Image (cartoon, rainbow, N blue to C red):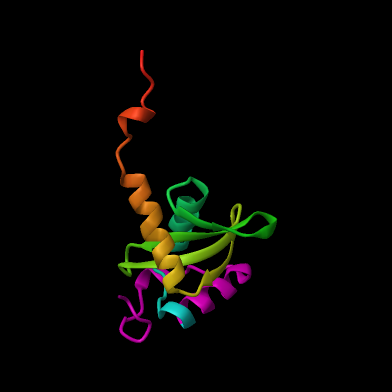
Amino acid sequence: MARASDEAFDERWLGASIPSDHWHFHRQLLARYGIVMAPGEFTAMLNDITKGRALRLVERPKGKAIFSVRLKTASERIYVLAVKRRIITAWPPNARLNQKRRELMASLAKPISDSMVPQS
């Protein structure tokens, strides 16, 4: 896992910036997971969420949801609270979400039984 203190400055950050409305997410990601994202990784995560590639774990009020996202450069799975195309925060990791993710993945991997296949 890439920790902020373990990594040297990534040259790809030269000339790049993080919009002020994303700073809360990045601070929480560092505090809760010890991860600093690589340049472009936030956009890739946002695309995974908006295009349905991220696993939606929990529906929250007002259109919010908690998603499970894999950060490739950190080789880590994180939880993200988002609403539509807006990332709100890095959700704290917890055993309940881990179990929910495992259950959803298992249900997605189950083959369709013969009784669910329409007969012609």
Magenta segment: 1-30
Residue 38 figure quarter: bottom left
Residue at 35%, 81% (x, y): give it.
3
- Name the residue: 52% across, 77% down: 28
Q: Quadrant of residue 118?
A: top left
Vertical order, 70 against 27 (above or below): above
Q: Position of residue 70 (x, y in %)?
A: 37, 61
Pinpoint residue 56: horizontal percent, then vertical percent.
49, 54
- Out of 114 and 56, give the one closest to the viewer: 114
Vertical order, 116 against 15 (above or below) = above
Extreme residue toward the right, this view: 62
What residue appears at the point 33 percent right and 35 percent down from the top-left corner?
112
Q: Residue furthest front?
A: 115
Q: Quadrant of the N terminus?
A: bottom left
* Residue 40 visible in the snapshot: no
84 vs 16, left or right, is right
Is 22 part of what is drawn in magenta? Answer: yes
Say left or right for 81 vs 101: right
* Residue 24 seen anywhere in this rendered image of the structure: yes
Seen from this angle, which residue lies furthest top? 120
In the rendered image, the vertical position of residue 91 relative to residue 32, given as above or below: above
The residue at 67%/59% (across/down) is 61
Relative image position of residue 21 (x, y in whole percent): 63, 68
Q: Quadrant of residue 7?
A: bottom left
Q: Nearer the viewer, residue 39 or 114?
A: 114
Image quarter (top left, top right, bottom left or bottom right) of the C terminus = top left
